[in-house]
Structures are given as C-alpha cells and as structure tokens.
Image: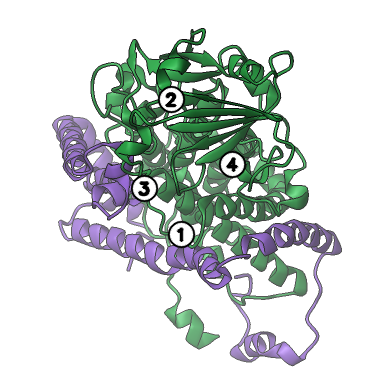
Amino acid sequence: MNVFTRFLPRWRSPLRGPWLTSVFAVALLVGIPVLFVTGLLSYAAYNPELTPVNDKTPDKGLLGFYLFSWPTHPYWLYRLTQGVHVTLGIVLVPVLLAKLWSVVPKLFELPPVRSVVHGLERLSLLLLVGGALFEFVTGVLNVQLQYLFPGSFYPLHFYGAWVFIGAFLAHVALRLPRTVRTLRRRSLRDPRDLRTELRTPAARTRPELPDATGLVPRDPAPPTTSRRGALAMVGLGSLTLFVVTAGQSIGGSLRGTALLAPHGRDPGSGPNGFQINKGMRSARIQERDIGPDWRLTVRGGARRSVLTRPQVARLPRHTAALPIACVEGWSTSDQEWEGVRLADLAALVGLGDAPPAVFVESVQRQGSFRMVALSAEQVRDPRSLLALRVNGADLSPDHGYPARVIVPGAPGVMNTKWVRQLNFGESTWPT
Amino acid sequence: MAHVTGGTRRRRRRFGGFGRRMPLGSPRVLLLLLASFALCGYAGVRLLRGEWVAILIWFAGAALLHDLVLVPLYTLGDRALQAAARRRGRPLARTGVPYVRVPVFLSLLMLLVYWPLVLRAPGPYQEATGLDPDVFLGRWLLISAVICALSALCALAAAVRKPELRERVRESRMGRRKGGRSAP
C-alpha cells in the first residue's frame, strides 16, 4: 500500500468537498433524467413495435415496456424532444466533467475494497462513470457523423443508456440523502449555504470541514479561485456550448449562431436550400433511378397500381407545413410541402375507407432506413404526404426527387426519400 | 481514506488480508446494488451482443481514459499555470490565473466536444450534409481568440480598479501569513 500511495496524486484543491459535489450533482439529477426520457421517446418515435425494419434493437425484451404508437400531434413533437436531448447532452458535458473532477479523490480511493458491499459499490461506480462517458461519447460522435464506435449507434446508445441508468438509480438512492443534507446545512463558516458561498471571493474561500465523504483535502492548497468562480466557469462552459450548438435545432435566423454545430448552416439557397440528412450521392442514388423511367408502385392486398411521375402529379394535391427533425438533434423550420396524401394513395388500391399501415421502400439500395413502416395513425393524418414539391419548387435530388414521404412528428429518417413503392396493409412485413 | 493513523503493520494486515473474512457491509445497500446490477446486467448482455470485446473496451476505456489521461493532463496543466503565476511573486488568489484558466478551459471544452469537425477527422460529413467541413477549425480558433480577448479585457478592467485591488491583496496576504503553504 505504501508503494501505491506514493504514486497516487495528492488532491489538494480547497474547493473539493461535499458542498461543491452536491451542487453539480443536483444539476445532473435534473439533467440526466431529461436526457434519459427524451432518449426513450426518440426510440418510441421510430415505432419499433410496428415492424423489425423500424427496430434497431429487436432483442430489447422488457426494455421496450413503455413503447406506444408515436403520435402525429403536435407536428413539432420530435423536433422538440430530440432537440432537447442532443442540445442538453452537449450542454451537460462540462457539468459531468466538473462532477467527476469534484469526486476524483474517490476514484483513486485506497484500500480499493473495504467490504463486500463497498467492493460492489465501486463496481457500480465503474458502471456509472463508464456508462455516462460511453453515452456522452457515442452521442457526441454520432451527431458529428463520426461512426468510430464498435457497431451500430442505435443498440450501443440504447442498451448503454439502460446500463448507465441502472447504476445511476442506485447512485442516486445511495447519495441523495447526503446531497440534500449537505445543501440544507446553514451556518456561517462551515458547513456553508449557497447564498453565502456565492458572496465569497477567492481570498476568503476556505476548505470545508473534513467529513466522512473523504472529498475534503487533508492538506489543502491555497485557493486560486472561489467556489462561485468554479461554478461560474462550469456554467460559462455550458453557456458557450449552448451558444455554438442550439441554433441548429432552433433554426431560423439563429441557425447561424451554431458556429460549431454540424448543421449550423444551410446547404444552399432557394426553395430546396434547407438541411439535408443524407444527400443523393451519400445514399448511392443513380441518375437513372430517379430519371424518366422512375415509377411509383402502390400495392395493397391483391391490387397494384403503377404510376409515372406526371400521373402522380395529377392526383389531388395538398400542402402541409412541416419540419424535418433528425435524431442527430438538428431540425429545419417548417417547410411548405406539396404532394399527394398517403390516405389518397391507399384509396388507389381500394383501402381508402380505413387506410392501414404502410411499408415504404426507397430506390436506395443499401443503408439503414431505406425501408420503413408508418403506422395507420400516421398514414391517416391529412398532413402525411407523398411530397413532390417543396416551397413552391420541385424537390431537389438531394431532398428525394421524384417523390418523398413527409409525416408530421416523425424522426427525419422515417420520411423516406426517392420513394419507389408503397405497400399498404402488409400482414407480413419484408425484413 | 479514513485511516490516517495506525502503523504500517495494521494497514498491511487490512490490505493484504484477502485470505481473511471480509466484512459484508450494509445489507440494505447490498440489496439496492443487487437490484441495480440486475437491470445493468439485463441491458449489459444485450449491449455486448456483437463486437463485445470492442464494446467492453469502449465502456471501461471511457472511464479509464478519463481517470488516467484526461484528469492527469488538466491537473498538470493547471498546476503548471499556477507555478508560472507564483513565480511572479504575487499572492495566489490575486494573480491572473483565472484570466488564463477560464478562456483556455472554454476553448479546450469546445475542442473536446467538436474535435471531429474542428480537426477535420475523415468521415461522411460533406457527402451526407452537402456542407463544407473546412470551416470549423477557423471558427474554433476565432471563437477562442474572442474569448481570450474578452478575458484580457476583464483582467485589464480588474487592474484599473487599483485601490480596491491593492486593499484586497493586503487582506489576502495577511490572511495567508498563517499556514499559507503553496501547492507542490
């Protein structure tokens, strides 16, 4: 042990102690559940129960207990929940780092195991810290289209979240009483309360009284900043990340403020100059796939209808103002889509009275989400269109020309581009 | 942590006592942890289907990378900054440490989150989004420069308010005379 302790750093910051840790803990206690719930909502938004094609985690078992048919009202629902999920996740990065900084002496605690329960608790902490960092790292990489992680993002981030939340719940149950006690303490010198602490400059900052947490240094260095300074620095970090990120979700004139976010700019100007998820080249779409030979096949039961683009364009056309909202957190403002209602296309094959769910196929030959299923509820919404035009112009090839699906409230990838075939009421979904 | 006192012999006995019976600890906590592990395990076996070795490395590696690389790096960086500030012979609380620490922290924080875009890591960004990937490095540098300039202005403003500053320096010096040892 003597050999070990010699190589361990001596943690001397006078700011460390239960009070500072508790303040960061409360911020995460609010933030992490919001991240978790919006993450679960995002999974539900794909309607994974409808078909295996929509479900990237088919072996979820009990972890999908809460799933429900994703609504089309309000049409901005996914834009909001996923914008919050991604933006809040990025904004919480400095808070998470600060929380870990504040408890770092515990991570190097010796002896490593004092009792059976203590050993299990430390194992739980490994799941907690590893889980938190795993979730933040995979999320932050995915929104930047950096697929370095080992496997598909969906199962990694989904199951990782459940591992993390399992450890998180235990941690909260074990530590919340102490956190509440710490923040409720009120006396002049120490323990300290929030208002006193926010008035204390660096020169008058003192270490907390040593206690059982083991966070307060036994040999504190003189302060170089106050606790309010530390909180301000972390808050400033969150604010900075918010400013350079949030515009990609808020959109409009604020998009330009998201200077470091992946979708902080528009890819062009004009009617089709809004954000693209996967462009035509990225989806390996050939010119001839979407040229004059393109046909739309509508199937339902035994009936089948094959249409050219001019024939589709002669069907009754409707408009809907809907955004595109991506799982990566960015979204567009409402765009004016113009096209044929999915319900009207169902009527072409005799399913107009009560349109069933539809299985949509793209001309895209590879890549996930080239096929998706939309629920009957989504098909029946009058704003759900097979769009041909946007903002008064034909769709651009990058936005899905000759025709694409647009559904209110659905994640971006559910709005299939370059649609080739619509299969209404399939009883056995192609996999 | 708790046993500061006590001879080497006693400590060795506690640490090396793997053959001895280890105390159990609180049964209430044990129950809670087992419930937590049940959920973690249920999700964990599903997480590890696929490239389980790589996933395990990512999961544990994230924690180890943080504890053994990131923490030592920023700790040493901050200690170097403090050492440099101390050499100027001013009391620590009144040196310019925060005016350097905060902008550097903000700049590195942005880099930590957005390094794939800032450092132009190869990826499908341009093809997928139709956006130019080369703007981020310049933007990050520019934002960092603006933050540093703002911090310098703050430092200047603090220095101009001299009478107050001088008083605080005296105050903090007097407060420190007793037991004011510096960090290693």
Name the residue located 69 percent from the left edge and 48 percent from the top edge. Answer: A172
Across and down, in percent, residue A168 comes to 66, 51
Where A70 falls versus A338 (above or below)? below
Name the residue located 62 percent from the left edge and 57 percent from the top edge. Answer: A211
Q: CA distance from mark 2 to mark 1?
A: 33 Å
Q: Disc 1 vs disc 4: which is toward the camera?
A: 1
Instruction: Residue under label 2, please give it.
Output: A403
What number is the disc on residue B113? 3
Instruction: Residue under label 4, please give it.
Output: A32
The amino acid beneath tag 3 is Val
Across and down, in percent, residue A161 comes to 61, 50
Residue count near mark 2 (Cα–Cα under 10 Å), binned few <14, some 14–19, many ≥20:
many
Instruction: Residue under label 1, please give it.
Output: A149
Name the residue located 15 percent from the left edge and 36 percent from the top edge. Answer: B149
Evaluate whether label 3 is on the same chain as label 2: no
Q: Disc 3 vs disc 2: which is toward the camera?
A: 2
Q: Quadrant of the C terminus of chain B?
A: bottom left
Where A168 falls versus A410 (above or below)? below
Q: Secondary structure at mark 2?
A: loop
* In contact (CB < 8 Å): disc 1 and disc 4: no
The amino acid beneath tag 4 is Ile
Across and down, in percent, residue A51 comes to 68, 41
Please give the chain letter of the residue carrying mark 3: B
Q: Please name whichever residue, A137 or A285, is drawn nearer the observer in this view of the structure.
A: A285
Q: Is residue B111 visible?
A: no
Q: Colour of chain B?
A: purple
Name the residue located 30 percent from the left edge and 58 percent from the top edge. Answer: B78
Where B113 falls versus A276 (above or below)? below
Q: Please name whichever residue, B91 or A169, is drawn nearer the observer in this view of the structure.
A: A169
- Earlier in the chain: of badge 1 and badge 4, it is 4
Q: Quadrant of residue A274?
A: top left
Evaluate whether label 1 is on the same chain as label 4: yes
